[in-house]
Amino acid sequence: MARKISMKDAINEAIDQEMRRDPTVIVMGEDIVGGTGSPGETDAWGGVLGVTKGLFAKHGDRLMDTPLSESAYIGAAIGAATCGLRPIAELMFVDFMGVCLDQIYNQAAKFRYMFGGKAETPVVIRAMCGAGFRAAAQHSQMLTPIFTHIPGLKVVCPSNAYDCKGLLIQSIRDNDPVIFLEHKNLYGHESEVPEESYAIPFGEANIVRDGKHATIVTYGQTVHRSVDAANALAKEAIECEVIDLRTLSPVDMDTVIESVEKTGRLICVDEANPRCSIASDISATVAQEAFGALKAPIRMVTAPHTPVPFSPALEDIYVPTANAIAEAVRKTVGGTRKAA
Amino acid sequence: MMSNNPFPLSKEKLLEAYRTMRTIREFEERLHVDFARGDIPGFVHLYAGEEASAAGIMMHLNDNDRIASTHRGHGHCIAKGVDVKEMMAEIYGKSTGACRGKGGSMHIADLSKGMMGANGILGAGAPLICGAALAAQKLGHGGVGISFVGDGASNQGTFLESLNLAAVWNLPAIFVVENNGYAESTSVDWAVAVDSYVDRASGFGLPGITVDGTDFFAVYEAAGEVIKRAREGGGPSLLECKMVRFHGHFEGDAQTYRGKGELEDIRANKDCIKFFQARVREAGVISTSEFEAIDKEVARLIEEAVAEAKAASLPSAKELLTDVYVAY
């Protein structure tokens, strides 16, 4: 049995192993070394939550602190990626993407197409996403749909340490720009993670739980809430299949459609705001591709269409809860369904 | 004729510089005519009048050196060695274009030549060049990165952030401000609060130089100095080239923001190619007939480029969906 480590440690290990394997991998970001030029410890922080702690001691100046200049250093990572390096740029919170979005969606995402297939931009932009830290509206968003909307970007949002390590290694080796979103609430979440290096291919969803009555499709933190909901529903003899998309671009619609063809019911759970979300995208695709298989209307369980609130009393009801997911499933299967 | 060459370049190199400038001029003046005739789709921003900057700077570069250009990028492309016929085909939207017809005038690129792309987003090239310079530094191949902006984009946050980042990381990067006096229609005198870009550079801890961008030799000399310093690990610099733009911001611009007689005056009295020819001819290094021989060759090249671009095939419909990802 493999050891259990946290998602935070899995990220650190993935970066460490890739830096050992490939000398062109570099890491940059605000405070990712955490103390450059300061009178105390040079690598005091290792990232604002300590995710890259210890890597500077192993890899030296291949890890670079940056000034607080998201446009400049995200752009630099993108430029360097077209010049023979494989940069991992850490943008502390995905909420800061707005500051540097041009470099991501007009530059990195478009080089290959605009230049007639003659460019490769192997850059990974890591950022924390999601609510649950009492960090309020500008540090808590789940902006995944912003990035899946843009052709040319790959978008990853893992739900556990095992997937996180394998998907991050794949992201670093991938030759396209990857937006790698780490749910800050999951940093401490532990799972079995092999010590050796491994890559998980993009576009392969994970069926976390088998079931025949309804399909729940989700990703990130709400995978766990969906499993909790499914476990509760099992006591009511409702068996849910829970699908963790893992990567949102590319997205594994085959697995989703296959499941819906089996269960006939679809519940899309998304921490993002509902309009033009991952949930609405999956819903629309299933309605188009597998309408005949549906026995009930598709339901979406998402955050409300509001900014993320600060007060714990409000934030706790912002992210879809296991109860809300279970209730949506009950409505979908007919509310009074008995054991099949 | 010649025996004493007073210039810092051999006769061969001077001929090369002239050919580059003449090629840019001919390319742009031809586009001006063909665009007006309706032959060319989209937006075109012409570099005519600014040739001494592209040529004077790029004479110092090799394929290892990277440049990031602007929406007004044809001159930079030609001077950096991008194939002129492929450029023309690209501007015509043809499958034989430098970007197979998917980029157009504002996105011509050839990474094999170190040309990271014209760019439709003003100031966007500066961060990218920090990355190119960082790669040169980390990979140790001695290359430099050169970011071009106009006086307009010199006010973009991306540009200003990049000056600081390049200084903090001591990157082999040069930030060239091609100051043609107008950000689209808005005067630099109004839109840039400092009197001198040298002051702006020093505000970011960078050395700055301002040169007469219509003087090829002034550009060449200043660029040589800052590029040499960058190659030797001396860090980034800012180079301002004061220049003139012979056409509008884009083709179709009526240019009513210009002063009365301004265009006639700059064409008659601030033509960097005429200046170059006069200097070199008077020094007895290159004769009129030698210039004319190049002019004829360039005219033929552009004529062929246009003919071939017009005759080339359009991209097939399946091209719409390719080249989005390396692998998906």
Image: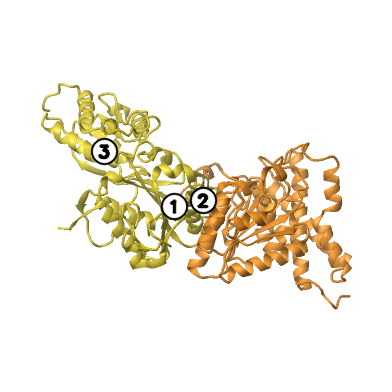
Chain name for mark 3 = A
Residue at point 69%, 49% (across, down): B309
Q: What residue is pinned by disc 1?
A: A176
CB contact under 8 Å: marks 3 and 1: no
Chain (orange): B
Q: Position of residue A44 (x, y in %)?
A: 34, 60
Q: Position of residue A83 (x, y in %)?
A: 51, 61
Which quadrant would residue A230 be assigned to in this image? top left
Q: In this view, does A208 lie above or below B271?
A: above
Name the one closer to the observer, B299 or B175: B175
**Which kind of residue does numbered mark 2 sit on?**
Arg
Q: Where is residue A310 in the image (x, y as percent from the top left)?
A: 32, 34
Count neighbours of disc 1 (C-alpha within 10 A) and say few if under 14, some if 14 to 19, many if 20 or more.
many
* Furthest residue in direction bottom, as rendered: B3
First in sequence, mark 3 or 2: give its number.
2
Name the one closer to the observer, B82 or B182: B182
